Amino acid sequence: MKHYDVIVVGGGHAGTEAADAAARLGVRVALVTMRADRIGVMSCNPAIGGLGKGHLVREIDALDGLMARAGDRAGIQYRLLNRRKGPAVQGPRIQADRELYRTAIQEFLRNRVGLDILEAEVSGFILSGEAIEGVILHDGSRLAAGAVVLTAGTFLNGVMHVGPRQEQGGRVGDSASNSLADMLREIATGRGRLKTGTPPRLDGRTINWDVVERQHGDDCPVMLSFLNRLPLVPQISCGITHTNAATHEIVRENLDKSAMYGGFIEGVGPRYCPSIEDKIVRFADKDSHQVFLEPEGLNDTTVYPNGISTSLPADIQERYVRSIRGLEQVEILQPGYAIEYDYFDPCGLTRTLAVRSMKGLFFAGQINGTTGYEEAAAQGLLAGLNAARHARGAEGVVLQRTDSYIGVMIDDLVTRGVTEPYRMFTSRAEYRLSLRVDNADQRLTPLGIALGCVGPDRTLSFNKKLEDLNAARNSLDSGKFSPNELAAVGINANRDGVRRSALDVLTFPDVTLAQIAALVPAVEDIAPEIIEQLQKETLYSAYQDRQQAQLEAVRRDENWTIPVDFDFSAVVGLSNELRQKLNRSRPETLAQASRIEGMTPAGLALIHLRLKAASVAPPRVAMR
Amino acid sequence: MDTIYALASARGKAGVAVVRISGPQAMCSLLPVVGSFGPPRVAALRALKDGDAILDHALVICFEQDRSFTGETVVELHLHGSQAIVQAVLALLGGLSGFRLAEAGEFTRRALENGRLDLAQVEGLADLIESETEMQRRQAMRIFSGELGKRSEIWRQKLLRAAALTEAVLDFADEEVPTDVRPEVLALVGDVLDDLRAEQDGYAVAERIRDGFEVAILGAPNAGKSTLLNRLAGRQAAITSEYAGTTRDVIEVRMDLRGLPVTILDTAGLRETDDPVEAIGVARAIERANTADLRVFLLGGEGDSLPVHPLVDDIVVQGKADTIMADGLSVSGRTGQGVDVLVDRIASVLEQRAASSATITRSRHRQVVDQSVEALESAREVLLNGHEGDEIVADALRLAIGFMDDLVGRIGVEDLLGEIFASFCIGK
């Protein structure tokens, strides 16, 4: 029997990151997928990044993952969302050429030493008590492994719906993995159903581009990866059109034929990404919705109409699409469909994404109830790292809410579970001002270097950047200037007698580099991107101070570890409801326990008391 | 280490009130008060003395270090359950060096820190904690089902709306959301700020209840101010002190007026004058009267005009009622005529103010309100300064909503220890 340290099941965004991350740590990895040619396929919209999602992409990149680098190889349009707002809420987003993206991912994986790609269907696991020891393939052969990462995407009991018509499968053209689903039901708890939808794909040659608005990329494009500076391929623009009263009427008349509204689907869909049926029912007073026409590639005429995902029958899809301006003559290449799939309650996972009830098994991606490429990839990365460390007998790696969006996402998932497909937003991060796309490398690359998952190129360029930043920070912070001295170079500061450094005034409105240079001549030798980075840092420093106490309190509570065998049922005084919730998500720290919904101060006090009583052996008083 | 003290029994009228004192100074500092202690853990009847004055005859129990609930030296005073006695004893303790009022749950916290609770005891305490916190919850519900509860829920809703608007603009930049939400956000923040500031004013009143209200008597020379003061003082048995004010020309008399602590200020007569010394006295009188909580204008002879403009609630009264006939309220310090009515009027005004403070007497609430105001101020500043910084506004709103959650007792992640021990009833 062939033996691997880590076996990754699935070749989507979670699986590829997991396999590559594990291999970067130097262990032997196999990525098992039903079709090797479909590794790195973007099943939904041809875009990567955005708000919150862009943060995840940058964090993946900071740990030397694939998504940002592959994205830049495929980026045919770059837009920095919220460009005119503060750096904490800016998110880079690209339109990706599907073919280029897939090619890039496959190339990265092919070149990764220690990583085998196996084309097979996994039909079961090799189990030994409460530990996993490998996988069983469809043909009955077996692969042994120290750890297994399962990234099944939408393939577990996947059912596709086009109107009332249903078909088993994980994606158009791919079959579902049902035997695996059956086996999982024995191992993991809290199975549920979720659904997601796609719009019909259009033939771009049949769109009347002259009558739709155009949306161009940025003049100064911002790359996904810290390693890239400029786009690598030609740039395109997208189109914007709108639904109208006629569109809405067609949809409304045929609601009963929609898989979702006709009652054919039991799964819950995301509120953030409503189908056209949803939009028309829930926002009945709106008579128009935006539709983005996104080209799927430079050499691909397929267009992805973002904003009109649907599960209506194919003929109805054609009718409503053709009611939209610019799409009157459009040909549908592939009808839209909704897909339902199994997920497992992520409360059954630890913060390393390990399945609590089965040693050595890790889950990442949609199986944990998330939606989106970026969310999946970020989990894959962390699960891959932890699987490799598990196989080696090393301790797990946990990212915190205070250090990353990945930490926020995983904490949300394993502490609270999901009620709808989970998508990242910047508003989920309470330390948003510190967790920016621009400092993802400063937050995470040192950790990546320490873990061994960051390659030499990135280590080199990161260390250089850090040196430059420190030197620039020191040089700008060296001298202090009075309001008068600042006024002499044209900088208006409060006449409060406070002396300020050039660093302090860097973020004053309308301050120019020439004025700074008049104070600190050395500034002219500092690279513009370093100055820009310092500006972003100082912009929020005043506001970050007030979060400091809060942050420290959270960190202190993160230090109160709750032992794995801690018996919540034995804590006298906890309500049954709280006990159930605690037993379901089994918080690993006091801070995590405090974030469980419905947790009360009294409940926390009881847990804390027990932890304290267990850790401090009380000096008993002799009773006379 | 401070020595802490608190009323360990329920507030309000009761047969017995227990005051618990814990800390290194508990016994030595109390020795002058109790005269002598009995054997440890045995009750002894003692007269509690503040100087020469006897405050109460109480049962006094002391516990040595390591043999007490907290593990520290502890003294318990079992007083007669009169609010006046309890207040007097607490005031006495507060004046002792190294003594301070215990924070919520501080006794239990010290017990925990000193290793006085083992697992079994913790579990034994669990039921107690649960019932205590349930009591607190009910108490909080009671407070919050009142005016402040309704209002804080409204504040929270408004802040949530403001935050949602701001977050929508930030997180859904590519979607069809309104772009300029700032006017509405600004209005919502402004509304809540106004309300919170009113609350801040409210706890200034709460302080008055503790420290006493000031009532200034103003009037022309010879309007009968001093006679009135003497009458007021003479009628009341509860004069606590009488001394010349910090300014030589303002006389202060502290008294208990219908249960409220009040300091009556007798000021220099107000009139136009060329005498520089008298002018200084007049100026001081006006200044002092302006900072007082309530002013009583005593009119003397005919044609007296008011030298200072009365504020809302200020009382204008005709003096020398025994010699001058007038419409409306008139009093005579000499005969006592109308003084009861005047006292009623003063008391009713002050009681009304005292009532307005009742909802946020707890320092926790006060802290929460202060912090919310600070956060919202910073949000408003950013909103008023151009078009940038939505993320900073959102951050401030998130903080403020967190504070509101604290106010209504939802769990926050801020300071767990504080949260935990706030769940324990004070003095337990």
Image: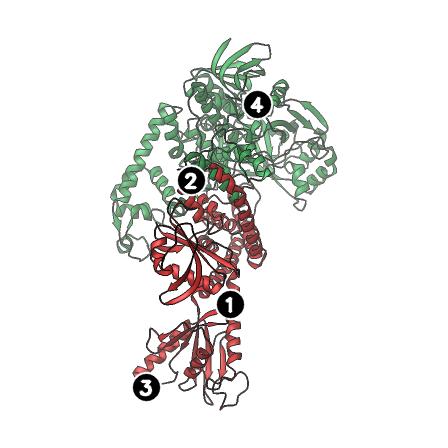
**Chain of the residue under the numbered disc 4 shown in the image:** A
Comparing labels 4 and 3, the label whose residue is closer to the camera: 3
Left or right: residue A277 versus residue A69 is right
What amino acid type should be assigned to the residue bearing mark 1?
Arg
Quadrant of the rendered image containing residue A211: top right
- Say above or below: A435 vs A458: below
Say whether marks 2 and 3 touch (CB < 8 Å). Answer: no
**Chain of the residue under the numbered disc 3 shown in the image:** B
What amino acid type should be assigned to the residue bearing mark 2?
Met
Drawing shade for chain A: green
Residue A586 image label: none
Drawing shade for chain B: red
**Chain of the residue under the numbered disc 2 shown in the image:** A
Do the residues at pointers 2 and 3 share their chain?
no
Q: Which residue is mark 1?
A: B353
Q: Secondary structure at mark 4?
A: loop
What amino acid type should be assigned to the residue bearing mark 4?
Ala
Q: Which residue is mark 3?
A: B274
Q: CA distance from mark 1 to mark 2?
A: 53 Å
Residue A623 image label: 2
Left or right: residue A486 versus residue A443 is left
Please tell me which residue lies in front, A592 or A96.
Answer: A592
Query: How many numbered circles are shown?
Result: 4
Q: Earlier in the sequence, mark 3 or mark 1?
A: 3
From the top left corner, tell me how far across and down residue A379 is, in percent.
Answer: 50, 28
Please tell me which residue lies in front, B190 or B256.
Answer: B256
Q: CA distance from mark 3 to mark 1?
A: 39 Å
Residue A152 image label: 4
